């Protein structure tokens, strides 16, 4: 069996990084023009999309969920490893 010739860079693993997700987010937020009403911003990392009208579930997806619940075809655990075929489609 042939060995792969790559591995972890120990120096980078030990040295703390100066760049964090929070740091990048802070830098972006500091550089936004707060006096620009024509371009509202959506907060990055905001886990709940419900306050934003541009993030709505498609009616087709809602109808598919309602149809699946009403059919009673899926009132069980899915088969192991493969899941439900209609859901995978």
Image (tube, rainbow, N blue to C red):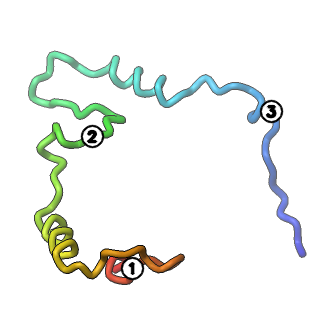
Badge 2 is on which residue?
A: 48
Residue at image coords 77%, 30%: 14
Badge 1 is on which residue?
A: 84
Separation of marks 2 and 1 at Cα, in angstroms: 27 Å
Badge 3 is on which residue?
A: 11
Earlier-in-chain disc, 2 versus 3: 3
Q: Position of residue 16 (x, y in %)?
A: 69, 25
Tell me if 58 is positioned left or right of 77 in this view. left
Name the front one of labels 1 and 3: 1
Picture quadrant of residue 47? top left
Earlier-in-chain disc, 1 versus 3: 3
Name the front one of labels 2 and 1: 1
User: Are there few (<14), some (14-19), or many (20+) residues within 10 Å of tag 3?
Assistant: few
Earlier-in-chain disc, 2 versus 1: 2
Is 19 placed above or below 77 here? Answer: above
- Asked which secondary structure carries label 2, the reply is loop
Q: Position of residue 42 (x, y in %)?
A: 23, 34
- Asked which secondary structure carries label 3, the reply is helix
Name the front one of labels 2 and 3: 2
């Amino acid at each position: 069996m042939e060995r792969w010739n790559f591995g972890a860079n120990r120096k980078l693993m030990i040295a703390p990084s100066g760049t964090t997700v929070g740091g990048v987010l802070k830098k972006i937020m500091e550089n936004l023009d707060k006096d620009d009403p024509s371009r509202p911003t959506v907060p990055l990392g905001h886990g709940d999309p419900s306050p934003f009208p541009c993030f709505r579930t498609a009616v087709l997806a809602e109808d598919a969920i309602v149809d699946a619940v009403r059919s009673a075809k899926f009132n069980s655990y899915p088969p192991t490893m493969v899941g439900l075929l209609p859901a995978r489609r």
